[in-house]
Amino acid sequence: MNLLCGPLGDAHNFNQKVELIETVEGLKVKKPRPIFWEWLFLDPSSSFRAQTKQITGCSFNQYLGSISYSSSQRGVSGICEYLLQPTKHAITEDSVLLKNFGRLLAFTTTLGITDLHIENLIIYNEHVQMLDIECVLFSAESPADTLLIPNRKINRERSPLFKLNQLVGGFSSKNILHIMEGLYQEFKFLLENRAKITEIISAEIDQMNRSPIRFLIRPSREYNKNFLQSTSLLPMIDEEREQLDRSDIPYFFGFIEDADLFYYKQLNQKSKVQLNNLETIKKKIQRSFQTPKSLLGHNRLYKVFKQSMMMVASRFLEAGKPMEIQSENFSIKFDGSILKIDTIEFSLQSNAVKPNEY
């Protein structure tokens, strides 16, 4: 095994970085951190992917992607396939890529997979491929929490929806219909199979309980000189400064159903973060580190289904410009000020429409 091009990405936990390496099998990526969550959701041979495919027939390949993880030390570090960044290409308007993106929105919102900015995802041909999964099991309220869609915490240029808009040459009503169909179909699939999926994922509960889940106090891009010299709405905590002083990008993590937050004060030795009166962080922790069973509960999933349909549809609206979309599963009508969505399952209406942000 030879180091081919050295470290990639940010330095965490005493200057450890992802490395691109050359092996007899070809290029690989070595990640000096637990990769259990990536293996579980991205490797077709994982217990979740293999058993879900066997029971439901769904492979997830087109919207979660397919990456093989070769390390047996998933709780410590791991090695995975290296995926070349695809070249730019034209995508036809009726491409299934748009449906796959809609499905990804629903799946990641349901399982609380977040921090999915454009650097953590590849869009190619008709497929979407996630590359890094560290932040999972967050009680997301809508796809905006995943960062696949712009929100106030991310510039739109770093949002995969913005990239998708560029690739398809703009969102026509037909393109919007494809995305909404994918979103609808995936939520329907998850609702219909939630008991089976919960059982499959819960079989890994022992490993899940031992596997750290990354917690972002703030986006990593904010740890730069300009930010450090400015005034933030969220004050820097001592554990952030400590890691910055040793030239690391601060890295925090927690565990399922645990209210504590940790970091590495020494290499591979976790220490508890002193939260004290940091109420903003505590509130976010309350929504983090959830069990798959709670996230896949019927009431929660149905609520997120409705909120996501409304929120995603509203992203494509322009104030004062009517739009109407009809499919066999739902209809979306916007008269310039009020958005109405009717599905087989529910009817929604909102006059608090956000302008498009893609």
Image (cartoon, rainbow, N blue to C red):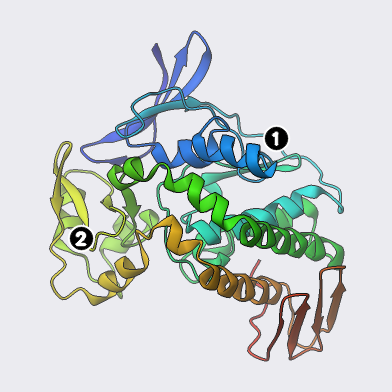
Question: What is the C-alpha distance between the residues marked 1 and 2?
Answer: 43 Å
Image quarter hosting the N terminus: top left
Q: Quadrant of residue 330?
A: bottom right
| Residue nearest the viewer, comparing 38 with 279 | 38
The circle on residue 260 is: 2
Q: Is residue 141 above or below residue 159?
A: below
* Residue at (59, 72) in percent of width and height: 302
Image quarter hosting the C terminus: bottom right
Q: Position of residue 142 (x, y in %)?
A: 55, 69
Give, as a three-letter code, the residue at label 1.
Thr
For mark 1, what is the residue? 87
Residue at the extreme top of the image, as rendered? 24
> Label 2 crowding class (10 Å Cα cut-off): few <14, some 14-19, many 20+?
some
Q: Is residue 107 above or below residue 21?
A: below
Give, as a three-letter code, the residue at label 2.
Asp
* Residue at (34, 40) in percent of width and height: 207
